[in-house]
Amino acid sequence: MPITTRTAQDPCSDAVPDPGEGLSGTGGRPGGKRPRGRFASRIIPFLRGEYAIAPRAARLVLVIYALLLLSRLIDSAFLSREGEYLSTVLLQLLIFPIPAYLYIRLRGKAFTKSLRLRRFPLTHLFLILSAILMLMAGCTLLAMVCGMMQAQPTFTLYDTFSSVHDGSAGTAVRLVLTYGLLPAFCEELVFRGILCAEYEKQGILYAAVVSSLFFALLHFDLTALPVYLFAGFLLALVLYITRSTLAAMVVHLGYNLFGVLAQAGLSGYCRSTGSVGLLVVILIALLLLSSAFFCGEVARILRRRAESSLLDDPEQIATPGLSRLSGRAFLPALGKAFLCPEAMLAVLLWAVSVVVNLVRK
């Protein structure tokens, strides 16, 4: 089902109402009231989010950031106990799915279709596999450039929860569920499902960039910022090519499994050997090959979709255009995603957390 443009009367619309609408003839003053001062006329619309694009999405991001930072204050009281994995699962459920569920309920049933929580055809498996390999190779190379491989012997979530593997099968299963499956579902539901649906009115490129920025800031790690920007953008591409958030979840899960089961080994290799040239060559080759295969699969899927006059599913949300913004308008519009108190507070929380981490180090 194609996405329809919502009018200003729609209660779910982000459109700013016309200032002249509904005003009486008393000099543009409703009911003859005194006009507001210059400061009030600017600050009140800003506080309401009238200058921002999709301010509701920024409110969700702020809630998630605040809950995640709050979890840092209480995780030390839980993670030293026997219920380490259970407490990590409960904290993740509190941080992501519960706020996401409340957000979706407030947005209404019509918004649920925009989340693209649908199965992907088996013909997309090769694209998904190539995306997993791209993510593994690209993120590992960026992590090496950023100096993360030497600094992190274990897999971490949001610089808060650290995985510990004692080699047993039971621990491996718990690691996969806690640090692999659950984060993939939670993060993709919010950052590819909800955020892309909110920002894609400006086109795929805009939604991919904004959701990737919020996704990168989520991890509260300045060093890892390029890694998560790359990952978020690639996951957004998978979402729009497959038209399925579940496909993005599978790609994310594949990368998380690599991080949980192999990152510690690669980190140990980088620390123990003085030369990592062979590893770099292998990763570059893997990145190039997987990228070529990914682009070929994208071309095949789009070609097949263009030849078809009907959507695969009549209830499916159609893919929006690449961009509804000109090159000059893109950066100003990008700034408008953060032009509301909630988005600015979210960025402020990230900056404060980064500074605190740098001071501690």
Image: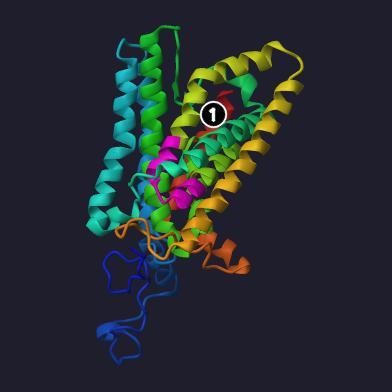
Q: Residues within 10 Å of mark 1 (few under 14, many from 20)?
A: some
Which portion, as a residue range, is magenta?
Answer: 236-250
Amino acid type, label 1: Asn
At a point 35% along the width and 36% down the height, the residue shown is: 67
- The answer to whether residue 327 is above or below residue 315 is below
At a point 44% along the width and 62% down the height, the residue shown is: 308
At a point 31% along the width and 21% down the height, the residue shown is: 87
Q: Quadrant of the C terminus?
A: top right
Query: What secondary structure prevails in the magenta region?
Result: helix
Question: Can residue 61 be spotted in the picture?
Answer: no
Question: Can residue 207 be spotted in the picture?
Answer: yes
Q: Which residue is mark 1?
A: 357
Q: Is residue 301 magenta?
A: no
The location of residue 54, given as percent across then percent down, is 40, 59
Residue occupying the far bottom of the picture: 25
At a point 36% along the width and 56% down the height, the residue shown is: 312
Camera-side residue of 131 and 151: 131
Q: Quadrant of residue 96?
A: top left
Disc 1 secondary structure class: helix
Camera-side residue of 350 and 304: 304
Q: How is the image coloured?
A: rainbow
Locate residue 289 relative to residue 315 in the image: left or right. right
Locate residue 85 relative to residue 230 in the image: left or right. left
- The answer to whether residue 186 is above or below residue 258 is below
Q: Quadrant of residue 264?
A: top right
Camera-side residue of 309 and 131: 309
- The answer to whether residue 223 is above or below residue 244 is above
The location of residue 75, given as percent across then percent down, is 36, 22
